[in-house]
Structures are given as C-alpha cells and as structure tokens.
Amino acid sequence: MSMIDVFNLQPTPEQLMVGVAKRAARRRKELGYTQAALAERSAVSLGSLRRFEQTGHISFDALVRICIALECERDLEALFAKRAYRSIQEVIDAQRG
C-alpha cells in the first residue's frame, strides 16, 4: 500500500461491491437461507448468487431480486435519495438556505 492509498478515503468500486456482497451473505445467513434457497426465492441463478457472494459482481436486476428476497428493498429505495454532505461548510450552507 502506498502513502497515497493511506490518505485515499474514497472506497474503490471493488471495495464497495465486495462490501455489499458480504452484507448480503450475512443477511442471507441471518435469515437461515442457504445459497440454493435464496437463489430460488430471488429467481437468480445459483451460479450468479455464488459469484456475487465471492466477488461482488452481479447485474442490477439480480441485485434488486436478491434485496427483495432478503427483505431489504427499503435499502434500495434510499439509494440516491439524498445527497450526502461532503464538508461542514455544506451543512452550514444548507442550514442557511
């Protein structure tokens, strides 16, 4: 890891995808579903589900189906709903105006 990487607070696309996949796998296990059971409930192929949990790669359509099967579709509804503040100045400006 270079010094530039140490100061880069922005996650990479790969890090975001793998993080989503890990959280989805954790939710699947919390609900007591096997990969095969989730694949059936979501109408996503078992191969696609396995690849997703291992690499984070999946189509958006399949991700939506998985979210619904895992009862977390509200998480998708919040996506892009509100822009996050990037600085304290943006918070102050928003309060003024």
Image (cartoon, rainbow, N blue to C red):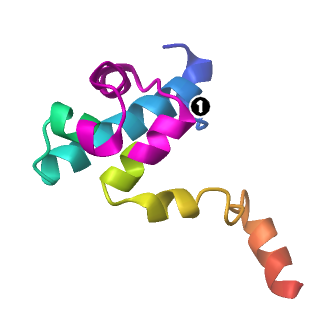
Three-letter amino acid code at disc 1?
Phe
Q: In terms of secondary structure, where does tag 1 sit? A: helix
Q: Is residue 41 above or below residue 57?
A: below
Kindly identify which residue carries mark 1: 7
Q: Is residue 79 above or below residue 48?
A: below
Query: Residue 95: x percent and y percent?
Result: 80, 84
Query: Residue 26: x percent and y percent?
Result: 22, 44
Query: Residue 40: x percent and y percent?
Result: 25, 38
Q: Residue at left 57%, top 28%?
A: 13
Residue 62 covered by magenta stretch:
yes
Most common secondary structure along the magenta stretch? helix
Q: Is residue 51 above or below residue 8?
A: above
Q: Residue at left 61%, top 36%?
A: 10
Query: Residue 28: x percent and y percent?
Result: 21, 45
Q: Residues within 10 Å of mark 1 (few under 14, many from 20)?
A: few
Q: Residue at left 31%, top 18%?
A: 47
Q: From the viewer's side, name the closer residue of 81 and 4.
A: 81
Residue span colored magenta: 40-65
Query: In the displayed structure, does residue 43 sit left or right of residue 63?
Result: left
Visible residue check, residue 80: yes
Query: In the displayed structure, does residue 45 sit left or right of residue 38?
Result: right
Q: From the viewer's side, name the closer residue of 81 and 1.
A: 81
Residue farthest to the top? 2
Query: To which quarter of the image does residue 77 belong?
Result: bottom right
Label count reads 1
Q: Quadrant of the C terminus?
A: bottom right
Query: To which quarter of the image does residue 86 belong?
Result: bottom right
Query: In the displayed structure, does residue 1 sit left or right of residue 47?
Result: right
Visible residue check, residue 23: no
Q: Residue at left 27%, top 45%?
A: 41
Residue 39 covered by magenta stretch:
no
